[in-house]
Structure formats: structure tokens, C-alpha cells
Amino acid sequence: MRTMLRKAPGRLSKFDLKLVRAVSNLPGGGHDEFFRRLSAAANKGKLWFGVAGAMALVPGRTRRAALHGLLAQGVASAVTNVVFKTLLPRTRPLPEHLPVFRFVNPQPTSSSMPSGHSASAVAFALGVGMVRPALGAALAPVAAGVAYSRVHTGAHWPSDVLFGSAIGAGAAMVTRKWWPVRPPFPETRRGAVRAAELPDGQGLCIAVNTLGGSYADETVDALQKTFPKAYIKKIGHDEAVDAGIAEVATRPGIAALGVWGGDGTVGAAAAAAVERSLPLLVLPGGTLNHFARDAGTPTLGAAVQAASHGEAAVADIGHVSVERGLPDSPEHLELIMLNTASIGLYPNLVRRREQLQPALGKPLAGVVAMFRTFAAGTPTTLIVNGVRHRLWILYIGRGRYYPSDHAPLVRPVLADGVLDLRMITADEPFARLRLLWAVLTGTVATSGITHLSETDRITVEPGNGPMVLAVDGEVMPGVRSVEFTVRRDALTYYSPLD
């Protein structure tokens, strides 16, 4: 074994010289300039940053593939330049080994072993290919060309290129679980029921919150044209939303309650509909229209179709019992939760993400928002179902949301009987660093600081002073305790049957 190790460097040198001579004997031509330009284009990763920038213009898997490729390239570059070039000093090929007209000028001064260009090229192409195989296959010849160009221009020995390529492949494999491709979401399922048919809006009474969602001056006129026989009430800034909705819900002859507004307005309308056993028509009047999207009425046309034909479904609702105020004179509130509730830094995260999303897209906006929120934020001590935790985020969804990370998007089933509990804890050592690392690599869902569970009852108490609770986007300070439960099939809502 020792003899083999002593002979290895000599054998490697002979191997390199043999291959370099073969390259040296190739006839000159236009390909010399091509490989020189290709090699220069890949200096400091410029070629791959440019390709990633072009890919990032296409949302979805292509943008995710670009991000994965850059992550793999970053790891490969760091390992190559910081670790192996220090541990394995090696002289680069000399001018006598190749024709002068091919030799790169100026020649790099760092160690020849291994090739950083090759490591970055292979890492980027494989990283992209793990997400978008077709794009990875298209980039493979370019990556191979960059790797070969380092030998063709005398910048590296062939073994340097092979070792660098192996590092690049290893980096791509190490990062294969970072920003993983999300599995497809389950199909939407709704428990269909019949509700009152509302031709031209007959029997429909609509509450419109002029301060919420996407309200504009022409909103009421547009709704009146869509539902000419409906009663429509505008709730202005000088009127409480709950009182305005209650007035609409008790109007004589009402067959169904409609609502236009944000999540808080829709939640108040749902409470009124459940109390009076009315079917609810949710119109897409919110900023993000969470419930309208989940209910199948993200457009006015879909809402019209469902209302006209009496197509409806049933949904569970969350029941929220809140105690707030001073200990000797507490205030007790009973609330309806249609979508989500949160305690901690989650509301700040959502606000920042929504601000950045138009410019950056949702995935990247989520990363940037997480870094900004948690770099300066502090954890909150809460007692959840009797267990004390230090938490960055406590998130509760009424129903099972997907994906299972810090940025849930969709809820395919509205009547599954569960509360989706997600906690990102600060109990573990180096919690902040672990959280930021999980955000950077897209592994929040599988990180040890993330705790996912499903239940039908959750109790939360503050560990050191009153807490701030957000239910369906409505923020409530001074909360001393809160209990979440599920009311099965409590709400009937209009939903097209497709």
C-alpha cells in the first residue's frame, strides 16, 4: 500500500502529461478562440450567474432550478477554493507543454489542484438538472466545454479538471435536499350540498366593506350589474363591520349572505351566516382572497355560477375562545376562524413577504422576508397544550394546509376536522442560526426546530405577560389565554361543482 501511495504522484503526472500532449498535437483553428472565450466567460461564475438570471425570469420549477444550481455552485466553489486549493498546492502547466497561441494569459496564480471552473460548471448543471432534467441536459455540454477549456488553454492539468468535476458533482448531491421540489398538492375535495338558487341575485344580500380588500369606487356598481336583484349594503369607515354585516344578515327575505372584503370581513360574515343558518357567498374582494380561493370562487364568474345554480359545499370552522384584559376583570370573546391564526413573528413575516412578492416572486420573497424578520426578532415564551416553548412562530390553520413549511399556500379540503399546528421553536441550541440556515436551504419543513402536528383542540397561554393574537388577519393584543376547537360542517358556502 505504501509503495502504491509513493508511486501515485508520479503516475498522475505521467497521465496528465500524456493527455496534455494529445491536446497539444491538435491542429489550431477557430476552436482555440472559442475555448479561450468560453473559459473566460466562466471566470468567477459569471456564465452561470447569467444563465441563472435568465432562468429566474420564468417562475415555478425553472426559477427553483436556477436557485438550486446556484446553491450547488456556491458550495462547490467554497470547497474548492477555500479547502482543497490550500491543502493541495500544485504548479500549473508550463508554456512548453502547450502551443503558445493556446496558453491562457495571464495564467492564474492559485494552486492548479483542483479546477474551480470545472467544479462550478458541473455543480450548476447537475443542480439545475435535479429540478429540471431537460435544462440540466441542455447545460451539460456547456459545463463539459468549460471543464475541457481549462486543459485546452493550459490553465489546468486533466486530473485537476477531473477532481474539480467530482467536487462539483458531490456538491450537487449534498444540496439535493435543499429547496426540494414540492410534491404535488392533493386534489381538491368538497362535500357538495344544495343551497338556495339565486338567479340574478334574487334573495342575496351582500355586505361590502369599503375599507377592506380590493374595494374601489366602481365595486358596488359592478356587483349590482352582476346581481341586479340583490340587496347590497356598503359598510363605511364610520360603521362597525360586525354591526353592518348583522344588519344585512337580518334583512327580511334574505336567502343567502354575500360578502366582499378581506379575511377579517369574510370571517365576520361567516360567523353571521353560521348563527343564522344562511349559506355564504364569498366574493373575491380581498387582497389575497384566501377563503374565496379555497372555496372555488376566486373569480366573480365562478361565484355567479355557484349562486345561480345553488351549488354549495360544507366547511368546518374554527371556534376561538379568547380571554383578554386584566386578571381581575377579564374579557371573554368567542370568535370564528375560517383560515389561520398566529402568535409570534408570523404576521410580520407575512407582511414583509407580501410587500416583496411582486418584485421577487413568492419563493425568494419568502426567503428575504424570513431573514429580515428573524435576524432582528426575538422568540416568545408560550405554553402550548400544557408544554412550555420558546417560539419564533406559532401558526394554526383551520384545516390541513400545503406545503408543510413556513409559507403554506393552499388548503384542498375544507372539511377535514383538524387544526394544522406548526411551531418553529427557539428551544434548541443555536436556534437562530439553525432557523436562518433552514430558510436559506429551503429545509424549514424538515428542520429539527420545526414541529408539525394535527389535532382538534389547542390551548395557548403566555409564558411571561399578555400575548398578541392574530385571527384571520385581525390582530388582538392583551390576550391571556386562547383555546381553538373545530366545529364540523358548520358553514355552508357556495362553490361551483365544476
Image (spheres, grey):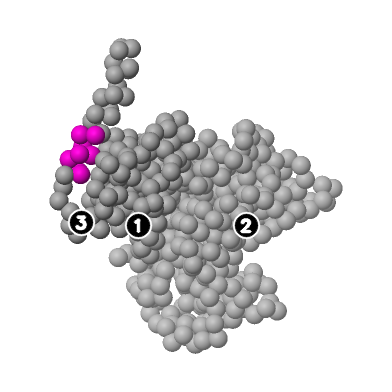
Residue at the image position 33 percent from the left and 45 percent from the top: 155
Where is residue 264 shown, x and y percent of the image? 59, 65
Give percent across and percent down for residue 190.
Answer: 37, 56
Q: Give the main secondary structure, helix, strand or loop, of the magenta stretch.
A: helix
Residue 487: x and y in percent read 53, 50
Tell us which disc is closer to us: 3 or 2: 3
What residue type is disc 3 on?
His
Q: Is residue 294 at least partly visible in the picture? A: yes
Residues drawn in magenta: 17-24
Which three-letter amino acid code belongs to the residue tagged 1?
Ala
What residue did someone put label 3 on? 31
Residue at image coords 38%, 48% = 107
Q: Nearer the viewer, mark 2 or mark 1?
A: 1
Disc 1 designates what residue?
41
- Marks 3 and 2 sit apart, C-alpha to C-alpha, by 55 Å
Name the foreground residue: 232 vs 294.
Answer: 294
Q: Which residue is mark 2?
A: 348
The answer to which of marks 1 and 3 sits earlier in the sequence is 3
